[in-house]
Image: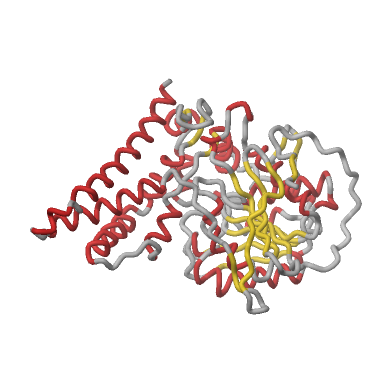
Amino acid sequence: MRYMATYDLMETLRNTNQWLGASALSFASYPAFAMVPNPALQWMAAWGEVTERSFQRMVAKPDWGIHSFTCEDGKDHLVNVETVVEGDFGDLIHFKVMGRETKPRQVMLVAPMSGHYATLLRSTVISLLPDCEVYITDWHNARDIPVSAGKFDIEDYTLYLVDYMRHLGPDTHVIAVCQPAPLTLAATAYLAGEEPDAQPRSLTLIGGPIDPDANATDVTDFGHRVTMGQLEQMMIQRVGFKYKGVGRKVYPGLLQLSSFMSMNADRHSKAFSEQIQRVMKGEASDHDAHNRFYDEYLAVMDMTAEFYLSTVDRIFKKGEIAKNAFTIEGKPVDIAKITNVAVKTVEGADDDISAPGQCVAALDLCTGLPDDMKASHLEPGAGHYGIFAGKSWRNNIRPLVLEFIDANAGPRKKAKAKTAKPTPKAANKPTKAAK
């Protein structure tokens, strides 16, 4: 009950702050006060509006908001978000552009499952839609998944990616953003050993912790400072009765959000203070820069406890990917078996989460891959977010990634013959293809 009580306490505090914001806005906007204008009341109303919106967003999954875009023919084409593979813990979705011929570039974006929804990559999707058929992993909020669905750890996550790659076929180009980079590399290696013909054409790893110790950050230091027992005691809670996943052990999104905010507390505090001032002056709008960013940033999701704990233990503490010692159901996954999948890494020079050196380590692990199928890029002045969104991505990184995809879109290079073995059945992996 202790785990459940703390989960419900956090939800109560969030709900209370949302109510306080709504109450302050309602009270300070009382029509009778208009007869005696007072800056304090204007500030209270502005504070209430910003506070209510902020805490309300924390439990709402953002919409993709990609309804249409203008194609080469100069016409606006509708975009349908279609689920192509369903699973208990995540789906593979496709942004189908109606009335447009299928693009030759087929891209699968692997979204992070580190506290935010896949919609965090909305701008990345929009930037790729004109040139690619875009698919993306849409992970589910653990609080909404019944306990009867079973566990979901990093091995299950990897097997989900294997299933997605199998479904899309060998002409796929995979782009993994941040957290999933090491597991996407492992999924490709798994296919290389079990089903080589199902491997993607290329693999682009963006700012991921392949070798967290290559260049330590606060994130990697935290993973080494605490014990697994301390993590379970401090971070893990049980979902309360309000949600379908009641009783499931999770790492709550609200707890992750507090960690995110504390890393740059001064910057976030300044941003909210300035937004309150803009609301007071009537200069704010529903979709201004502040609201566009924080509507997404504050929308957080819970992760299963086993996924969070196994990530810290096996990726950060033991460095199983960095040491090429990762296993699935006790069977080694050898990254050296990747021999004909082009691999590119992208890092930001100012990335304070996955610092330069952590991601490019993937190239050294691919010992079976020819040098002409390896590439890397270090983006000057780019932080963690900038390497997959914003100007750095749009102007510099995206063109390089598309160029890399095109350079490796031809016939696959011949790999050494391997004996295919039957794929072991994965617990909880997706099996239903949407019709």
Residue 237 in the image: state x and y as whole percent: 46, 30
Residue 386 in the image: state x and y as whole percent: 50, 64
Q: Is residue 241 above or below residue 91?
A: above
* In the image: residue 291, left or right of residue 337: left
Which of the two residues, 39 or 413, is positioned nearer the viewer here?
39
Q: Based on the displayed image, in which of its 4 quarters is residue 148 positioned?
A: top right
Residue 403 in the image: state x and y as whole percent: 69, 73
For the view shown, which residue lies furthest in the top direction? 1
Q: Residue at x 46, y 57 (%)?
A: 352
For the view shown, which residue lies furthest in the left direction? 36
Q: Residue at x 33, y 58 (%)?
A: 267
Colouring style? secondary structure
Q: Is residue 416 above or below residue 143?
A: below
Q: Is residue 345 visible?
A: yes
Q: Residue at x 74, y 68 (%)?
A: 103
* In the image: residue 382, left or right of residue 400: left
Which of the two residues, 99 or 151, is positioned nearer the viewer here?
99
Which of the two residues, 404 or 116, is positioned nearer the viewer here?
116
Residue 251 in the image: state x and y as whole percent: 49, 36
* In the image: residue 341, left or right of residue 206: right
Q: Is residue 310 above or below residue 53?
A: above
User: In this figure, what is the number of numbered marks?
Assistant: 0
* In the image: residue 343, left or right of residue 272: right
Q: Quadrant of the N terminus?
A: top left
Q: Is residue 372 visible?
A: no
Q: Residue at x 57, y 50 (%)?
A: 112
